Amino acid sequence: MDRTYLTTPIFYVNAEPHLGHTYTMVVVDTMARYCRARGLDTFFLTGTDEHGDKIAEAAGATGETPKAYADRISTLFRSTWDALGIRYDHFIRTTDEHHRRFVQHVLDEVNRRGDIYFGEYGGLYCTGCERFYLEKELVDGKCPDHKIAPKLVKEENYFFRMSRYQDRLLAHIEAHPDWIRPERYRNEVLGFLREPLEDLCISRPKSRLEWGIDLPFDRNFVTYVWFDALLNYTSAAALRGEAFFDGFWPCAEHFIAKDILKPHGVYWPTMLMAAGIPLYRHLNVHGYWTVEGDKMSKSLGNVIAPLAMTARYGTDAFRYFLLRESVFGLDADFREETLVSRCNGDLANNLGNLVSRTLSMVQRYFQGKLPERSRPEPLDDELERAFTTAASEIHEHMRNLGFNRALEALLRGTDRANKYIAETAPFTLAKQPAQMPRVGTILRNLAEALLHTARLVAPFLPDTGGRILDLLDVSPDRLAGPAPRWGEGLATGHVLKAPVALFPRIDARPS
């Protein structure tokens, strides 16, 4: 695999960016940076989903037109990701003209193949979910997500023959056991498919909803929001031409939260099959974030605003907490005191301390210039192996979406470097002039450790990786491409900068 196409869900513009959105963005940004650093041709797509009932209602509540409302909230998402340093390659909006044309093209194609028909349907409709529910799917007669009773709606609409593709979808899942990751979500989709698939209503009459993409074969109807939104992944690739689409689309890695598993694991692949488009490579599903054990909600006043957190602790500290505190696929809990503990322990005491001590000793004993490196001793070889092992383990964990375990492997390397300082005691040896060559070797090894740390940490904490390179007076270009051999990354006489505190200790959680 020499390329990858990474996507987040396109976020619905009925709410401002919060912790849940941010986690997905940080995960995909980390994966994109990691892939780029390994030399993969990488494309990272995100954006906003802007049609449907909820947007029309939200716009009405603010006195705006749906388009003006969508413009405002979509801009807020984009500016938030830019402020957080997220390096996406394209930001798509479902109101983009090229997307509208692509959706209508696919609808025409699926209709031409005989997979769309007109019929009457009566069902229980939840505006919050923008979907019909079967009675057996309700909990005490209410939508399981929004806790309100859906409305009985009976109307004529267009339907997609989703049921026609049930057996083919099952066969694909069985032939590709890791297509949906982690396995628990594969099993959940298989659970959906144990029951006969119903056909999917893919339109809304304009008498009820005008805010959407017109059906190309009947202008009295607009497209159901999911049949519109899911196609963003392919419309963005198609925008760049046939060669790009053919090269990148089969390498698509979708990252989503578990609440939208069914549309992505059932609706989406059957839509692709009906349109004659190859399926994506993986569907990667993460859990929810709670806040001190409670679900985030405006009524509880516990919605975590990402920019407020980064203003308080810094972008990299916030990123670190999100990646380190969660296990991909499982739910995680946000506690500010845990964030402070992680910052002080892992970042300030371990990583930050290693950088500060190493640079301080190079300044003190060699006026900032890297000394010559003499024959290595066993402890030197152990330090080198620690970073070789860390790089190997990080690669394996990233292949398996183990972001937290990758960071654990990185910290084992920096922890070993801190222990190496204690074991070799250069500050003691420096008191004996005859031992200065050995002190020089120790500090050269530690400088190499910092160079390798910068490369390993950069996908997770990009500002930190860049700052370490700056302190080493090394070009940021060194973050990409093959890692230098140990001992060959920095030349004798190379001048390092004076130390700064990468992660100042936080005394207490702010009031």
Image (cartoon, rainbow, N blue to C red):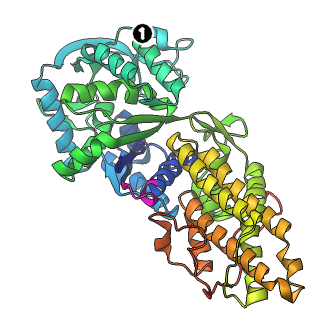
Question: Which quarter of the picture shows residue 126?
Answer: top left
Question: Which residue occupies 48% across, 8% down?
Answer: 136
Residue 36 is covered by the magenta coloring: yes
Q: Is residue 319 visible?
A: no
Q: Circle 1 is placed at which residue position?
A: 194
Q: Nearer the viewer, residue 111 or 420?
A: 420
Whole-percent x, y for residue 175 in the image? 37, 21
Return the residue found at the far front. 375
Quarter occupied by the C terminus: bottom right
Highlighted magenta segment, given as a residue range: 35-41
Question: Which quarter of the picture shows residue 226?
Answer: top left
Residue 504 is covered by the magenta coloring: no
Mark 1 nearby-residue class (10 Å; few <14, some 14–19, many ≥20): few
Residue 403, compared with residue 436, is above or below; it is above
Whole-percent x, y for residue 295 in the image? 64, 35
Viewed as shown, does residue 511 lie left or right of 266? right
Q: Nearer the viewer, residue 351 or 80?
A: 351
Question: Which residue occupies 29% across, 40% down?
Answer: 250
Q: Is residue 75 visible?
A: yes
Residue 188, compared with residue 468, is above or below; it is above
Question: Which residue occupies 61% across, 85% down?
Answer: 492
Viewed as shown, does residue 207 lie left or right of 362? left
Secondary structure type for disc 1? loop
Whole-percent x, y for residue 495 in the image? 62, 87
Type of the residue with mark 1 = Arg
Q: Nearer the viewer, residue 65 or 419?
A: 419
Whole-percent x, y for residue 307 in the image? 58, 59
